[in-house]
Image (cartoon, helix red, strand yellow):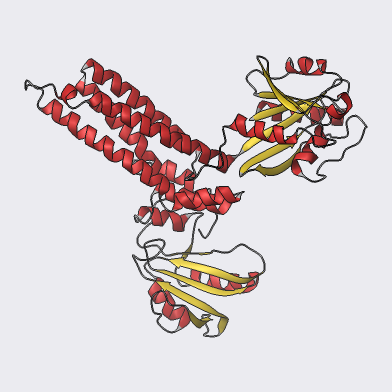
Amino acid sequence: MTAAHPSDTIAAVATPPGKGGVSIVRISGPAVCPMMTDLLGLPLSPRHARLCRFRGADGEAIDQGLALYFPAPHSFSGEDMLELHGHGGPVVTDLLLQRVLSLGARAAAPGEFTERAFLNGKIDLAQAEAVADLIDAATAQAARSAQRSLQGEFSKRIDQLAERLVWLRTYVEAAIDFSDEDVDFLSAGRVGETLTGLSDQLDTIAVAAHQGELLRDGLTVVIAGRPNVGKSSLLNCLAGRDTAIVTDIAGTTRDLLREHIQIDGLPLHIIDTAGLREGADRVEQEGIRRARAAIADAGRVLLVVDDRHPEQGEELLQELPDGVPVTRVHNKIDLTRVPPCVVHSPGGAVVYLSAETGAGLPELRQHLKDCAGYRGDEDGIFMARRRHLEALGRTRTWLDLALSNAQAGAAELLADDLRAAHEALGEITGRFTTEDLLGSIFRSFCIGK
């Protein structure tokens, strides 16, 4: 992805491929008005839909539909924009796009319309990312949170923190300029108290951002265990449908089975795996190898054991990679008559349930939310990404260093720490950014957005 060029006019189909009621060809750039004349044969009033014929090079109609003109700077991209709403057939849509390209437009890169909106100051970087997050939202809660970010909720909190940081930077720079005066500016201005307040405000934002990241990325849960302990039955129980084949034959599951569900808005990416055992045939051995690879990358492993043979859990724990978060799930409590519950011990949590009857499933769902640190009932959660959390973490590190240097009276080092904290914070909204970062962000967008 490269920065937008003022001389470029871009075009793309903004609706999904395939047949539909309507398809939209979107055009943005300085050549929109001349193209409008060639395509429509008449001028358009700004922001008024008009029924028009979309003309080919020979003057014959390619299609008929609604045309909408948005003059700069009052458009999504901040440039002149034209949208052609035609019939949703792939052939007619492609003919219309090729006609636009023949008039001098070039095919837009993924996310280029939104990138131009960012570069033209219509939205900041966090809002631009929220556009893609809204499109990709897997739950209603995620969609609401992405909408809050798109409306600027996240950016507003960052800007408020940045304003306080700018004030403090200005004060410290003034203290350095008047360092030969008798007044101790660092003490008199209560810099330490201000830094503590900034850190508290940052922590509040970070907590909300973590919730937003969970809504976006969810939690990857791998179900593992010996054959015939009820792993596939647990997957079906969590999914609410018969996703996996369940039999009493050991080795029925030989590959990874994936299911996407949500718990109170928290997306869960559940992976059922082949039973871990020795002496399997070559096909099953490959399934076991894939199971172990999935376990190593899991956000949470549900280690399922038959409650009649709890020693299996201790044996399998020794086989798992170090550092993998594990919850032991004792299944088949309908046979052992153990009540459903979650027991916390020094060795980790143990959930007692029955995939056959569903007893203990509510406790497991709550346990998974607790493991993720998810509190989906809170109002005001905004969408956030891993890079946002990393930027907030770097900001916190610099503020901690600033507090140490303020206490030591090292004004120059304090000023440098505050500058670095401000830059780290500015990466979130794009105040301080790089071409590489922009490229990695907008490449993930769909074409036409």
What residue lies at 86% left-to-right and 40% top-to-bottom?
245
Coordinates of residue 45 in the picture (x, y in percent):
39, 79
Coordinates of residue 408 in the picture (x, y in percent):
23, 15
Given residues 376 and 89, the one toward you in this image is 376
Coordinates of residue 69 in the picture (x, y in percent):
42, 73
Q: Residue furthest left?
A: 181
Q: Is residue 176 left or right of residue 218?
A: left
Residue 335: quarter of image: top right
Given residues 388 and 69, the one toward you in this image is 388
Given residues 135 and 311, the one toward you in this image is 311
Q: Residue furthest right?
A: 249
What residue lies at 78% left-to-right and 37% top-to-bottom?
235
| Residue 266 to residue 20: above or below | above
Q: Is residue 273 visible?
A: yes
What residue lies at 82% left-to-right and 34% top-to-bottom?
355
| Residue 151 to residue 56: above or below | above
What residue lies at 60% left-to-right and 72% top-to-bottom?
22
Residue 160: quarter of image: top left
